[in-house]
Image (tube, grey):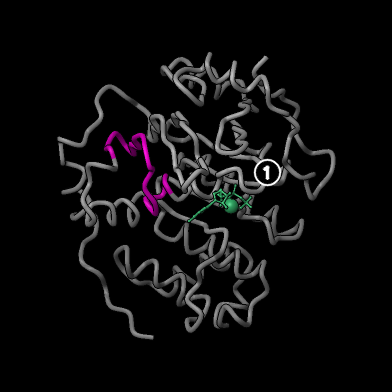
């Protein structure tokens, strides 16, 4: 495969970020979802959700199958647009950006770990990682190999996706998402196909990135993976049905910076009233390892 250096993406991104018309004023939040919905016919995959995420937060999104988690991740990652409502990343409302500017956000701000992998089948593992470098800025095979080594895949680097197990493909996706050092990592079930050992490798990687200030939003069915996040929100049929903090210091910092609880509907109080009729069984599966989940009670509508 031949890869050439792309043009200076940072420069292009700077142009997007200086579009003053699209700057939402008065917020320190990296991500702001303002009453977003995604509607397919009669189905509200995401239903009037408001959520703010400060820079550096580690947030988990949990919920049963079909509750709207991937839909939400696609909207945050500029892969999809909401039917209603507004999304702001770094203070820029995404609906105000043109296609080129959105592509720059995808390239420069967000690192995506997809639930369905989306590896290029005719490229090897290392070439798949280099592809992300290519679209971002500069191709560097040594760095790409190091990224694969980081997820324990150095010996599989020159194999095609079809020659890799599901868990190995998942780790190639993670290496690909992290290679350009994104500010925001969106990981949809990043450990769904991993055994205990590899889950630990990925969680350690996330811990390292979190300690360096990277913002992480992870969708998971695994209670242990969710409990590693500072904060968890729970969706059910596109509606927010619970929120809990696993880290009191992070919660205090969030509240001090003006952060408010996530909610569905017109206000947090409305969300509480609405949610009172729902069944709040925690839909996350048991963790792969036992005895390691943190305590922490869900704040459920009463
Ligand atoms: N393009 C689409 N057209 C119609 N309905 C869709 C579309 N995409 C998703 N949906 C529906 O929206 C709902 C939410 O889907 P989504 O993929 O976000 O769920 P999820 O929470 O990620 O589920 P899982 O845990 O199984 O991955 C589902 O009922 C799904 O069938
Ligand atoms: Mg999904």
Q: Nearer the viewer, residue 266 or 217?
A: 266
In this view, 130 is above or below 84: below
Out of 136 and 91, give the one closest to the viewer: 91
Outermost residue, right direction? Answer: 290
Residues shaded magenta: 75-93
Q: Is mark 1 within 8 Å of ligand 1?
A: yes
Q: Residue at coordinates 39% horizontally, 72% vertically from top-left?
A: 131
Check if residue 92 falls in the magenta segment: yes
x, y (%) of residue 216? 51, 43
Up-down: is 166 above or below 174?
A: below
Q: Residues within 10 Å of mark 1 (few under 14, many from 20)?
A: some
Which residue occupies 16% across, 49% down?
Answer: 15
Quadrant of the rendering where the N terminus is positioned: bottom left
Question: Does the stretch in magenta take in 145?
Answer: no
Q: Label 1's element? A: loop
Q: Give the residue at mark 1.
A: 64
From this view, report whether residue 68 is shown above or below residue 260: below
On the rendered structure, is 198 left or right of 262? right
Q: Looking at the picture, how far across and down is residue 100, in whole percent?
A: 22, 57
| Residue 256 against residue 212 in the figure, above or below | above
Which quadrant would the C terminus be assigned to in this image?
A: top right
The location of residue 179, given as percent across then percent down, is: 44, 61
């Amino acid at each position: 495969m031949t890869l050439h250096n792309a043009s200076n993406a940072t420069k292009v991104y700077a142009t997007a970020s200086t579009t003053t018309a699209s700057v939402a004023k008065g917020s320190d939040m990296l991500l702001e979802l303002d009453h977003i919905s995604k509607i397919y016919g009669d189905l509200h995959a995401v239903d009037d959700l408001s959520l703010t995420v400060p820079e550096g937060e580690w947030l988990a999104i949990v919920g049963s199958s079909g509750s709207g988690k991937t839909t939400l991740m696609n909207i945050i990652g500029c892969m999809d647009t909401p039917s209603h409502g507004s999304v702001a990343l770094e203070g820029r409302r995404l609906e105000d950006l043109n296609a080129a500017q959105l592509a720059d956000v995808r390239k420069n701000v967000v690192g995506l770990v997809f639930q369905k992998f989306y590896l290029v089948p005719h490229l090897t593992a290392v070439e798949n990682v280099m592809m992300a470098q290519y679209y971002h800025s500069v191709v560097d095979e040594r760095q790409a190999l190091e990224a694969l080594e980081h997820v324990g895949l150095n010996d599989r680097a020159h194999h095609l996706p079809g020659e890799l197990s599901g868990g190995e493909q998942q780790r190639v996706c993670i290496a690909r998402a992290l290679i350009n050092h994104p500010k925001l990592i969106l990981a949809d079930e990043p450990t769904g196909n991993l055994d205990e050992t590899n889950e630990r490798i990925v969680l350690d990687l996330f811990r390292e990135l979190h300690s360096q200030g990277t913002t992480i939003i992870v969708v998971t069915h695994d209670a242990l993976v969710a409990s590693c996040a500072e904060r968890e929100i729970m969706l059910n049929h596109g509606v927010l049905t619970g929120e809990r903090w696993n880290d009191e210091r992070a919660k205090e910092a969030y509240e001090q910076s003006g952060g408010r609880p996530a909610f569905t509907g017109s206000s947090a109080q409305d969300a509480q009233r609405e949610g009172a009729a729902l069944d709040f069984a925690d839909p996350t599966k048991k963790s792969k390892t036992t005895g390691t989940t943190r305590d922490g009670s869900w704040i459920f509508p009463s």
